[in-house]
Structure formats: C-alpha cells, structure tokens
C-alpha cells in the first residue's frame, strides 16, 4: 500500500510552500517525516502570495468580525475564522472542526495584586474542546491529513496531543494511533484518547523515545504524523495570537509568557506575531518568553550553555507532565522567536509550579501544572527587572485543571513534597477535604473556623 502524498489535493498549493528553517529550501510538498530533504531540519509554511500583494489589515479585521456573526461551522471555529492567513482549502466544508478556539481572556486580579502587575491576563487554551491548546493546531493538520487521503494518523504524546489527535481523527472519520510513555502520562489525558477510539500504545520509553519511533514509522507505513513537527499544526496554533490581539482590540501587550515543552506552541505564537507585524495588523512585537520546569529545562540550558547554537538535551523529570520533554523538536524555531521578539527563557522549581497553580486556582479558573509555570516564571522575570510592574502581561494557560487531578489532590492533601521543604505561602494555599460527622453542629463549627481563618 503506497503512502498518500503530503502535497494535499484539497489545498491550493500556489497559496503556500514548505520552507526549511535551516537551509531555506522551498518545496510544494513535504516528506512523511516533515524533514528537509537536503539538510534534515524542520519545515515551516510560508506564503509567497503575500509578497506581491499582501492582505489589507483593515479588511482582514473586518472580515474576522463579520464571521463571528455567522453560524457556518468554518466560521464558528476560532481557528478557521482566520483562514485568510492559513493554507487555503478548495471548499470551506473540508475543515475537520470541533469549534475549537474562541477561548476566554481572563483578568487575574488576585495574582495581579500579589505580583504587583495590575494588568495581568490569562489566555486560557484549556477551554478548547479536548481541554488543551493542541486542538487549534490539530484541526488544521487533521484537515490536511483527510484531504490527502490518509486513513491513519498518529502521534507521540505526553497526554494532551493524544487526546486532541484522537478526537479529531474520530471527527474526520480516520483511525488514530497514539504512542505514549508507559507510566508517565496522566490517566485523565489517556482516558480521552481511549474514549475517542484511538489505538493506544504505552511504550517502555520516554516521550522522546516515542517520537523517534513515530518518525521511523511514518517512513515505512501510510501513516500521517500529527505531532508539532508537522508545520500544519503550528499554522493552526498561531491563531491563538490573532484571537488574543483581537480580544485586546489590536493593542499589543508588552509580554506574552508561554510554557516550554516540545516548543511548538511558542514557535507558532512567535510566527504569528512576526506575520501580524509584517501585514500591518500590529505595529510592534510583544516580548514572547518561554518558561520551563527545572527538571525539563532543555531550552534554558541550550541558551545558557550553548548560546542557542546547539541543543543541550536533558533527562526530563517533572510532575508537570505536559512539558516533561528533554529533547524538544522545535528548539531552533523557539530560539529564533526569542531573538525576534526580545523574549526571555526561565526555569522554575516544582514547588514554584505548585504554588503558582494553586494561585491560579484561587482565581476560580484553574489550569494544569504545566500552565502554571507561566505565573511562576513571571515572578522571576519581575525580580530580574525584565518585566516592569506597569506593563501588560498575558499568560498562556495551555491545559484545563481537570487534565491532571492527581497533582491537585496530592498538593491539597500535603502528599506532594517532603516535610520541611515548603514555605508558609505554599501551605496557606492548601484546601484539603475535611471528613466530618453528618451533623449540623460539625458543619457549623467548620464554617466558623473557616471564617475566622479567612481560608
């Protein structure tokens, strides 16, 4: 059985090209592993049609506003609503969509007061259909997979990608194959992939081992890769930035802070910012910064030890499982984005992640542990003077609080850290469940104690 071509028949190839991020080679099609045929590096999508006659910024903004009033599936999607800046389909009904995007932008008043940054906002991508940011990229990549005639799509995952891919495969009437590291993935995320019908394989390796195996598989079998190595994924994920700036009435924030795992999301958002400036949608670039867990800090070490010239891999270990990646595929793209926007790269400890997660939870919105590195990182960037209190800061929350309930329960029960390793601020954020006799007196006393303590 021959492999379908990734030069998708349902897409007008004149609208875009695959470009190598290293040697700059341009092609109308891509190899199954989405690597440059000349130098083996990653690909990105570029739009030659923008050069002779770039889209008019005000016309784009007007079209996007009008589509918000439409009930067509392609307009109800917070990704495809911005399709003018995506690879074009022959027909709008070709899109495989679950109504992704359209995620809320929250103010964080309590976190703003505690950090001293009054204008602190959170763009919550955990409010997507499968509860993570992955959906915005998956709708685009899955659409192209189906239009190319693939029956099977596959991904390696720490959890969120598997859930998203399985959902969009099912929606697009395709089969899904998931490769996850055994024992290193939240059951909440794994249950999603299983429920959506994917063939789920728990491999005795880490995420990086799963990804290496997937790269081999797509060269041998008619299987379409849906990891963020696939540049169509990043085209979908870049729409977060379009939507964010629209929500801000096209007033650029000073900083956007993103969690760093495989580094596809930061690369996508940075690509969008650069494109928006080139098209006149914004006049200046916000600083985009990446925050990693100390135990999975490959990009931090790459910048500090190698000046961003070569990847320093690590043996990743953190309870923020969504970013437990030691060999990030998109590191070169991320380095380029940091340089283009003047952003920073920081790392935070497990205790700092847990505290930040509880603080975001106290705002009434919550997030998964990996998302909380953004708030923890902001605190460090403030101390360093990189972020100023009077500036506008947007934290990108990538996953829903329900993605990793074990983390939340362990934290509030006090089972996460060794005795004596915590600070008072961390302990004050705990709200463990209280077991009581089923009497009015017991409940009343508990209510009075909570009122006195202010907890």
Image (cartoon, rainbow, N blue to C red):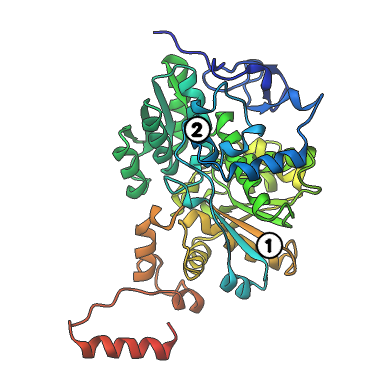
Q: Are marks 2 and 1 in contact (CB under 8 Å)?
A: no
Crowding around mark 1 (Cα neighbors within 10 Å: few <14, some 14 to 19, many 20+) is some
Label 2 element class: loop
User: What residue is at 49 percent from the left and 25 percent from the top?
Assistant: 94
**Quadrant of the frame with the N terminus:** top left
User: What residue is at 49 percent from the left and 27 percent from the top?
Assistant: 93
Give the distance between the C-alpha atoms of the residues marked 2 and 1, in whole angstroms: 30 Å
- Which residue is the site of mark 2? 227
Crowding around mark 2 (Cα neighbors within 10 Å: few <14, some 14 to 19, many 20+) is many
Front label number (2 vs 1): 2
Looking at the picture, tell me which residue is in the foreground, 103 or 44.
Answer: 103
User: Relative to residue 121, is residue 98 depicted above or below?
Assistant: above
User: What residue is at 51 percent from the left and 77 percent from the top?
Assistant: 425
- Which residue is the site of mark 1? 381
**Quadrant of the frame with the C terminus:** bottom left
Say whether disc 2 or disc 1 marks the residue closer to the N-terminus.
2
The picture quadrant where one finds residue 368 is bottom left
Question: Measured from the top left, where is residue 239 in percent x and y?
Answer: 61, 41
User: Relative to residue 251, is residue 420 depicted above or below?
Assistant: below
Residue found farthest to the left = 438
Residue found farthest to the top = 1
Looking at the picture, tell me which residue is in the foreground, 33 or 102.
Answer: 102
User: Relative to residue 149, is residue 388 depicted above or below?
Assistant: below
Question: Measured from the top left, where is residue 29 in percent x and y?
Answer: 60, 16
Instruction: Using residue 140 as the reference point, say whether residue 332 is left or right of it.
Output: right
Label 1 element class: helix
User: Relative to residue 346, is residue 173 depicted above or below?
Assistant: above
Instruction: Using residue 247 as the reference point, say whether residue 400 is left or right of it.
Output: left
Question: Measured from the top left, where is residue 44 in percent x and y?
Answer: 65, 28
Whether residue 417 is visible, yes or no, is yes
Looking at the picture, tell me which residue is in the foreground, 247 or 142.
Answer: 247
């Amino acid at each position: 059985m021959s492999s379908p071509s990734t030069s998708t028949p349902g897409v007008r190839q004149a609208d875009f090209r695959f470009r190598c991020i290293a040697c700059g080679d341009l092609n109308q099609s891509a190899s199954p592993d989405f690597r440059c045929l000349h130098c083996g590096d990653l690909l990105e999508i570029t739009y030659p049609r923008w050069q002779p006659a770039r889209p008019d910024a005000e016309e784009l903004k007007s079209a996007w506003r009008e589509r918000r009033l439409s009930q067509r599936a392609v307009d109800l999607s917070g990704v495809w609503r911005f399709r003018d800046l995506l690879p074009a389909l022959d027909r709008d009904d070709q899109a495989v969509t679950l109504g992704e995007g359209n995620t809320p932008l929250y103010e964080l008043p309590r976190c703003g007061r505690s950090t001293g940054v009054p204008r602190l906002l959170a763009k919550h991508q955990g409010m997507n259909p499968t509860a993570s940011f992955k959906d915005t990229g998956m709708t685009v990549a899955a659409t192209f997979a189906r239009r190319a005639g693939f029956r099977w799509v596959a991904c390696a995952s720490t959890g969120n990608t598997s859930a998203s891919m399985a959902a969009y495969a099912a929606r697009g009437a395709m089969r899904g194959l998931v490769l996850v590291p055994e024992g290193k993935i939240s059951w909440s995320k794994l249950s999603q992939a299983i429920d959506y019908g994917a063939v789920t394989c728990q491999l005795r390796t880490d995420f990086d081992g799963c990804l290496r195996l997937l790269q081999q598989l797509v060269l041998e079998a008619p299987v379409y890769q849906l990891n963020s190595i696939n540049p169509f994924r990043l085209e979908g994920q870049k729409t977060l930035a379009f939507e964010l700036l629209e929500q801000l009435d096209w007033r650029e924030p000073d900083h956007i802070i993103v969690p760093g795992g495989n580094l596809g999301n930061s690369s996508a958002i940075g690509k969008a910012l650069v494109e928006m400036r080139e098209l006149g949608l914004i006049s200046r670039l916000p600083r985009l910064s990446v925050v990693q867990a100390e135990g999975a800090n490959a990009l931090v070490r790459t910048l500090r030890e190698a000046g961003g010239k070569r990847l320093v891999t690590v043996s990743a270990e953190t309870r923020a499982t969504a970013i437990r990646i030691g060999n990030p595929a998109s590191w070169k793209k991320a380095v380029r984005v940091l340089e283009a926007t003047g952003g920073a790269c920081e790392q935070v400890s497990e205790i700092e992640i847990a505290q930040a997660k509880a603080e975001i939870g106290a705002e009434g919105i919550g997030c998964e542990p990996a998302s909380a590195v953004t708030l923890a990182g902001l605190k460090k960037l403030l101390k360093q003077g990189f972020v100023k209190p009077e500036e506008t800061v947007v934290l990108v929350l990538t996953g829903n609080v329900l993605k990793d309930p074990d983390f939340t329960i362990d934290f509030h029960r006090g089972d996460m850290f060794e005795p004596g390793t915590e600070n008072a601020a961390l302990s004050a954020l705990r709200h463990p469940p209280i077991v009581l006799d089923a009497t009015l007196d017991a409940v009343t006393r508990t209510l009075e104690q909570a009122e006195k303590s202010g907890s």
